[in-house]
Amino acid sequence: MKILVTGGMGYIGSNTVVELLKNNYEVVIIDNLVNSNIEVLEKIKTITKKEVKFYEEDLRNKEKLTKIFQREKIDSVIHFAGLKAVGESVAKPLLYYDNNLISTLVLLEVMKEENVKNIVFSSSATVYGDPKYLPIDEKHPLSTTNPYGTTKFFIEQILEDVYKADNDMNIVILRYFNPVGSDKNHLLGENPNGIPNNLVPYIVKVATKKLESLNVFGNDYDTVDGSGVRDYIHVIDLAIGHVKAIEYMKNNKGILKVNLGTGKGNSVLELIKKFEKVNKVKIPYKIVERRKGDIATCYADTKKAKELLDFTTTYNIEDMLQDAYLAELNNK
């Protein structure tokens, strides 16, 4: 089976490509390298000892995308491509709506024209908004608190309508929580261009003295210590979840929405302490005002993933934090 991975040079995409190759899938990557690096391609080859075809292209270019589909004879798509920083989306909503929605619409148009029926979509727990109850299951009402989350919500609605129009479509929507860590070679860590938007990459930059200190956004939430609580999942576990979704689609038709998380929450301050302990480094931090669009607590109900995808996580929070740090040291 030949799988097109959009955004396959990014953090989650590249780790998923590795797991697909380990499971003997043929992989084609499309990425415009806006928030990724061409060096990732060589790292994937180093880890897997396999060649992977790569196209530097923007999904919004329908003519180029159609040619890739026709040339490569694609069977299934895993769709990661998109801008993903919550704070930036609040400041630049039009950029996010243009990039994330138009690219998906063009991709789905080309899939329809080329008769490709299988897609796994990289969604997010942000579609649940401010949780009404915990843990969050897939029946939880959907709402969003920032434009990034809203793009994920809109794309889910688009996929629902695509399925209603064509019941031969196989769609798996993976709503995942907070990915952390790297592959075990420590080559594919989260290494965003510029200042990191996510917590653990920022902690890692502080640990290696590339940044002076960490801002903790708020200490007055209704949580164990006042700082925000999130469900962190190792990126290898998350990547394996995508392989499980592809395998599920081989034997099951329809549209499926599944959480990928651990079902456990850690606060920002807990995470800092655990990082310091496992990596034997000090993380200076300061408490600052809450960030717009953030919520207090978010962690997954994982039963559906276990029942339908046979998916359970393997790695704990200490594994995640150690792998994230070692990947950064390896990236110097």
Image (spheres, helix red, strand yellow):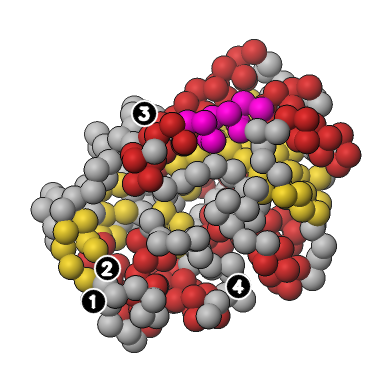
Q: Main secondary structure of the magenta part?
A: helix
Tell which circle, 3 or 4, labels the residue nearer the N-terminal end: 3
Tell which circle, 1 or 3, labels the residue nearer the N-terminal end: 3
Q: CA distance from mark 3 to mark 4?
A: 35 Å
- Residue drawn at x 78%, y 36% is 64
Q: Tell me if residue 110 can be seen.
A: yes
Q: Which of the 4 image quarters holds residue 39?
A: bottom right
Q: Report the amino acid beneath label 1.
A: Pro
Residue designated by label 4: 187
Residue 209 falls left or right of residue 30: left
Image quadrant in which the N terminus is located: top right
* 179 w.r.t. 79: above or below: below
Residue designated by label 1: 284
Q: Marks 2 and 1: in contact by CB < 8 Å?
A: yes
Q: CA distance from mark 1 to mark 3?
A: 36 Å
Q: Residues within 10 Å of mark 4 (few under 14, many from 20)?
A: many
* 107 w.r.t. 277: above or below: above
Q: Report the amino acid beneath label 4.
A: Leu
Q: Marks 3 and 2: in contact by CB < 8 Å?
A: no
Q: CA distance from mark 4 to mark 2?
A: 24 Å
